[in-house]
Amino acid sequence: MKIPVFQYVRQRGIVWVCDLEQSTSYLNSDANAGALEDFLPRLHAVGKTAVTLAGGDVFKWAGDGFLAWFPLELERTLPNRAGSVFQAIWYLTVLVNISRLGCPDVAPAFKIRHGLTYEPDGLLYRSPEGVEILGRAVSLAFRLASVPAPFPSFVAQARVFNAALQTTDLHLRSEDWAPTDEELLKHFKGQRSGTEDLVRSTAKAPDVPVVVSEAIKTARSVIKKIEDAEYPQTGFAARFIEALLEGPDWSQRAANEFHAWSREAYESLAILVANMEKGPTRN
């Protein structure tokens, strides 16, 4: 028997780990195990599609999630790449939340969460069995993906998140997060290394006064983009939905549910803006 040849290369890049919440409890439940077995291969398929469209590769399927790698040849490309990754995270999370990836309505309300890190010195090695990647930030991303956070359920190194804000048009809210001693033990095995500069998604509105005229202006801008077929019909969303529509029946159903949700959100926004422009109702 010949010892296989391994090829090693150093790379920098963004690590994205996607994880399914409560997968063990679903698997141990007779009522939910079947739905989980239907859902996981679909998550793998749409996850790989989202990662590829964002310019990355799925390096490892972890059973209930995946590890994706986005190489960075140049440091200055970080904002564009990070913005693409967050686009993929947002649309994949929305798709899972509203469609269960085409699983029956009786299936559990599956939720996914995400850990994102910057790896400056990843070690990639190739063998006949495939590609593996090692690095401190790779291990950290797996830990971050286990931490609960509000939609779109991400915990990230601030460097990656702040870079994404330079290029993405998504309205992403975050808060600084410093894990407590109890959280360090639960999610990081008590190790504090790498946890000094983290952010996570939040449902909290920013603590700034709301100017109605500015809110209307922003909402009108979003509505115009939708009506002009600039958003979300083009860019990442368009390519993602197009890929879903070209897939099997379950992915087509998921795409149609996403389209219906988008239309409903647009109509609700238009009604809200119209009411805001009218001003308060006087009795």
Image (spheres, helix red, strand yellow):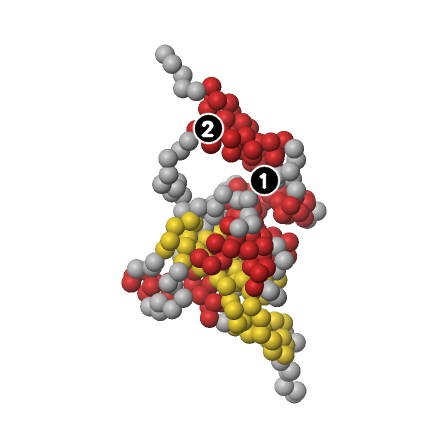
Say which quarter of the image contains residue 48: bottom right
Name the residue: 46% across, 71% down.
136
Say which quarter of the image contains residue 41: bottom right
Crowding near the residue tagged with mark 2, few <14, some 14–19, many ≥20 C-alpha atoms within 10 Å: few
Secondary structure of residue under mark 2: helix
Residue type at mark 2 is: Ser
| Separation of marks 1 and 2 at Cα, in angstroms | 30 Å
- Residue 53 shows in the view: yes
Q: Residue furthest bottom?
A: 1
User: Mark 1 or mark 2, which is nearer to you?
Assistant: 2
Is 10 left, or right, of 183 in this rendering? right
Mark 2 — residue? 213
Q: Residue furthest right?
A: 246
User: Which tag, 1 or 2, sits closer to the chain's start?
Assistant: 2
Name the residue: 51% across, 67% down.
119
Mark 1 — residue? 258
Name the residue: 64% across, 38% down.
230
- Residue 68 shows in the view: no
In which quadrant is the N terminus drawn?
Answer: bottom right
Secondary structure of residue under mark 1: helix
Say which quarter of the image contains residue 188: bottom left
- Up the image or down, 215 lies above or below 40; here it is above
Residue type at mark 1 is: Phe
